[in-house]
Image (spheres, grey):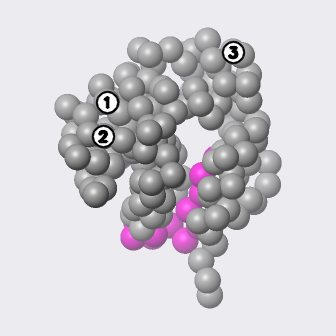
């Protein structure tokens, strides 16, 4: 059974591990090489520590298998470890993030998906998020940003 809870600082190493592996699965080959150079293990650990207060983790049998992070009205990060994909963990994390964004008063939550990540795009569409068009996402790196071609997905609520 999956449980979702707020992340704590002790979770950072496992969040970073899940993030790096899943990020590489969905991004390598679809992002500028310049960003790949900046996304080494230490960058995932540093960024996971910085966002822990905005993160919820999914656990199965006491092991963190995924996480979701919010930033303003954006569902900023959602990643699931490979063995937990297809089990409903991503769906549960997405629903948790959407509920929290809506509860914070954001009428149109959004997220960015790397344009070439067909698996993620299909997942978000299946879960009720709609492709709102191209987005030049500015991914932070040390000393600046790298522009990544993405699609902006928005949660469209029934009227």
The residue where tag 2 is placed is: 64
Q: Which mark is residue 14?
A: 1
The answer to the question of whether label 1 and label 3 lie on touching residues, with beta carbons closer than 8 A, is: no
Above or below residue 157? Residue 136 is above
Measuring from the top left, give residue 35's x and y in whole percent.
64, 20
Q: Which residues are magenta?
A: 101-112
| Residue at left offset 59%, top offset 30% | 25
Q: Between residues 31 and 63, which one lies in front from this camera angle?
A: 63
Look at the numbered disc 2 and give the secondary structure of its residue.
strand
Q: Between residues 146 and 90, which one lies in front from this camera angle?
A: 90
Above or below residue 153? Residue 34 is above
Q: Nearer the viewer, mark 1 or mark 3?
A: 1
Above or below residue 13? Residue 63 is below
Q: Is residue 146 left or right of residue 48?
A: right
The answer to the question of whether label 2 and label 1 lie on touching residues, with beta carbons closer than 8 A, is: yes
Spatial CA distance of label 1 from label 3 is 25 Å
Q: Nearer the viewer, mark 2 or mark 3?
A: 2
Q: Which mark is residue 132?
A: none
Measuring from the top left, give residue 10's x and y in whole percent.
20, 31
| Residue at left offset 64%, top offset 48% | 120
Please tell me how crowded label 1 is: few (under 14), some (14-19), or many (20+) other residues with Cα within 10 Å.
Answer: some
The residue where tag 3 is placed is: 34
Q: Earlier in the sequence, mark 2 or mark 3?
A: 3
């Amino acid at each position: 059974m999956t449980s979702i809870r707020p992340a704590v600082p002790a979770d950072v190493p496992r969040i970073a591990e899940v993030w790096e592996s899943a990020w590489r699965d969905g991004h390598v080959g679809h992002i500028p090489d310049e960003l790949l150079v900046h996304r080494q293990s230490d960058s995932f650990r540093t960024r996971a520590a910085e966002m822990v207060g905005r993160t919820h983790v999914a656990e199965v049998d006491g092991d963190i298998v995924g996480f979701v992070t919010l930033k303003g009205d954006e569902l900023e990060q959602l990643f699931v470890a490979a063995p937990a994909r297809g089990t409903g963990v991503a769906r549960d994390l997405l629903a948790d993030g959407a509920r929290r964004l809506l509860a914070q008063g954001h009428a149109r939550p959004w997220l960015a998906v790397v344009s070439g990540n067909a698996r993620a795009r299909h997942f978000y569409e299946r879960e009720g998020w709609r492709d709102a068009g191209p987005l030049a996402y500015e991914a932070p790196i040390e000393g600046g940003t790298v522009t990544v071609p993405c699609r902006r997905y928005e949660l469209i609520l029934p009227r």
